[in-house]
Image (cartoon, helix red, strand yellow):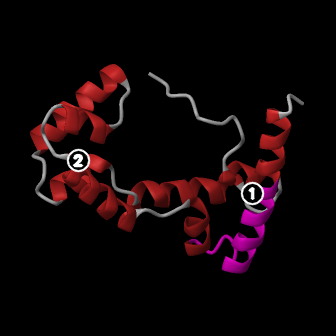
Amino acid sequence: MKMERKTPFKLFGRFLVEKGKITQEDLFFARALQRKKNKKTGEVAAELGLMTDEEVEFVLIKQEDDGSLFGEIAVSEGIITKDELSIILKKQEEYHIYIGEALVELKAFSTKTLIEELKSYNFEKLQYTKNMQMGA
């Protein structure tokens, strides 16, 4: 089941490629770095000892069926508490790397360029959102 994005506005990496700030190859390697570093909720839950591998697999199968968030399913099934989910999500943030951070780490561009491009991206996104709200 394919989940729809909340907004049809392009993602930051695609924005950078279209502006010629990075190559498609840069984006590929940055996404690969994200996949390597960004841990899934179930991985973190198991790492913290709050869920077994079997419980993680059970939730993943249920998630395939209904598309709900991993943590919502784990809580609704009584596998973890809401407080434990908060702990898991907080720990998960420690592992998270954004696409811009990955590009800087891979030396596709500098931190200064990242900040400039984020400003440009957010400005365009804001303009897009305003236009969508006005029906343009």
> Does 3 lie within the magenta span?
no
Query: Is 17 placed above or below 106 here?
Result: above
Where residue 120 appears, as percent x and y from the top left, is: 80, 61
Q: 106 or 99: which is nearer to us? A: 99
- What main secondary structure does the magenta stretch of the protein show? helix
Where residue 57 appears, as percent x and y from the top left, is: 18, 35
Q: Could you tell whether 94 is left or right of 134 in the image? A: left
Q: Could you tell whether 110 is left or right of 86 in the image? A: right
In contact (CB < 8 Å): disc 2 and disc 1: no
Indicate which disc residue 82 carries.
Answer: 2
- The residue labelled by disc 1 is 122
The residue type indicated by label 1 comes to: Asn
- Which residue lies at the image location 21% right of the left edge and 32% below the top edge? 76
Q: Start and end of the magenta stretch? A: 106-123
Give the farthest residue toward the right. 136
- The quarter of the picture where the C terminus appears is top right
Task: Indicate which disc, 2 or 1, sits on the residue closer to the N terminus.
Answer: 2
